[in-house]
Amino acid sequence: MPSKRQLQLCAPVDGWLEAAEAGSPNDGKPVLRRFAMTAYTGGAMTLAGWAHPVVVDLAGLQVSAKSRPILKDHNRSLIVGHTESIGVQGSRLMVSGVISGA
């Protein structure tokens, strides 16, 4: 029986990334910048530790409501923000959230 392996998606982002301008609300506190991006396009990925290219079947993907860190250069020690929304749109994995650090 094959053992289960956990897949951590840490691949370069191909596609669209947009960060909104920061603003100031009426209470005087700064507003964090927001972002939206395509995190996965549905294509094959070459990942360390996997002998063959990996393709994720997004139709079977279960995403929890838990916020996920957004990493600079995929470095786990450089957290620059977090997700507020992760969802599947066709063959793409779309992510949006806030930039809360740099």
Image (spheres, rainbow, N blue to C red):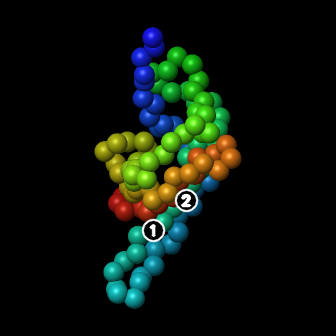
Which amino acid type is shown beneath numbered disc 2?
Ala
Q: Which residue is mark 1?
A: 33
Q: Residue furthest bottom?
A: 26
Question: 78 or 95: which is nearer to us?
Answer: 95
Residue 15 appearing in the image = no
Residue 5 appearing in the image = yes
Report the residue at 43% width, 63% height from top: 98
Q: Quadrant of the N terminus?
A: top left
SS of the residue under disc 2: strand
Report the residue at 39% width, 52% height from top: 66
Q: Gap in Å between the C-alphas at discs 1 and 2?
A: 11 Å
78 horizontally vs 83: left or right: left
Which amino acid type is shown beneath numbered disc 1?
Arg
Question: 48 or 2: which is nearer to us?
Answer: 2
Q: Residue furthest right?
A: 90
**In the depicted structure, whether residue 17 falls above or below residue 30:** above
**In the depicted structure, whether residue 102 falls above or below residue 68:** below
Question: Picture coordinates of residue 12 (x, y %)?
Answer: 53, 40
Report the residue at 56% width, 51% height from top: 87
**In the depicted structure, whether residue 68 falls above or below residue 25:** above
Report the residue at 45% width, 79% height from top: 23
Rendered image quadrant of residue 84: bottom left
SS of the residue under disc 1: strand
Q: Which residue is mark 2?
A: 36
Question: Picture coordinates of residue 55 (x, y %)?
Answer: 60, 30
